[in-house]
Image: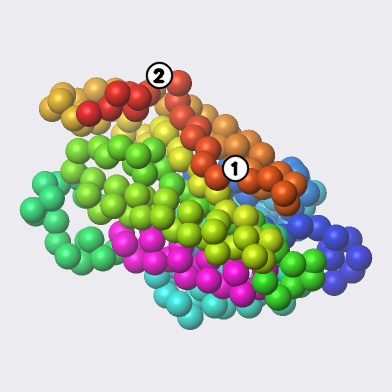
Amino acid sequence: MNAEEKAAKVAVVTGAGTGVGRAAALALAGEGFALVLAGRRPEPLKEVASEVGSAGARAVAVPTDVTDPESIRALFTRTVEVFGRLDLLFNNAGMGAPAIPLEDLGVEQWRAVVDTNLTGSFLCTQEAFRIMKSQSPRGGRIINNGSISAHSPRPYSSPYTSTKHAITGLTKSTALDGRAYDIACGQIDIGNAETDMTARMKKGVSQPNGTVMEEPTMAVDNVGRAIAYMATLPPDANALFLTVMATRMPFVGRG
């Protein structure tokens, strides 16, 4: 590594190929971070790496399955090999289950969501801790993607909502356990950012009162800006919880 590469802060973003992950990567690149882009599909990662490069930042694409501990270990090993340190982890990779009655949900569908959203974030956090505790200068920051569902569920969303509530517990525990090692941890809760996953909002989604209603969305770039704010706070400050949402979405008072 040359001196310029050593000077750059280094961020790992999971689920980086599309949507929120892509927006976060581009926003962080604009703040001078070097990026390690993780996700299941190589092609979208390569496209984002190219965009990051066009923004003047370095990026490497590392295809990763966050449900596989060996794949996660390889991701963080690669990060240190290329950049020598880790300053930021954005635990963003996630998925949901079909919107069907709770009693009809298969256990494998439940486990797939838990393994991706919760266990994957925990395993990535473990690897980040090991690096951040031992590097010099010591420490770093972890940001977890919590979602509005960390506060209030949508109908037929028990696996997703359960994991996002659990992410709040992981965020608090990580913030507490990281204090001694200068590792900060915060959570961003996102409501109706316009991505492929929220395209259905414009067609109408089920509401707690049994109706189906179109919901407002916001540009996903707003999420990128929020993550960049959290990521660039000085080491003695932490945004423990930050909510960014479409102003008119039915969240406050939901249910």
| Badge nearest the viewer, 1 or 2 | 1
Q: How many numbered marks appear?
A: 2
Which residue does the image show at 68% across and 45% down from the upper left? 237
Q: Pinpoint residue 127: horizontal percent, then vertical percent.
A: 56, 72
Main SS category, magenta section: helix
Q: Nearer the viewer, residue 205 or 159?
A: 159
Residue 189 on the magenta segment: no
> Which quadrant of the rendered structure holds the C terminus?
top left
- Identify which amino acid the numbered label 2 is placed on: Arg
The residue that appears at 62% across and 55% down in the rendered structure is: 184
Q: Tag on residue 248?
A: 2
SS state under label 1 = loop
> Up-down: is 111 above or below 237?
below
Residue 128: percent from left, percent from top: 60, 68
Identify the residue at the far top of this view: 248
Q: CA distance from mark 1 to mark 2?
A: 24 Å
Q: Tell me which corner region of the image, top left, top right, bottom left or bottom right, holds residue 5.
A: bottom right
Question: In the picture provided, is 163 more to the left or to the right than 11?
Answer: left
- Colour theme: rainbow
Q: Which residues are magenta?
A: 113-132
The image's mark for residue 239 is 1
Tell me the kind of residue under disc 1: Ala
Q: Is residue 30 above or below residue 245?
A: below
Quadrant of res 254: top left
Q: Quadrant of the N terminus?
A: bottom right
Residue situated furthest left in the rendering: 103
Identify the residue shown where x is 89% and y is 61%.
Answer: 4
Left or right, 6 with respect to 139, comes to right
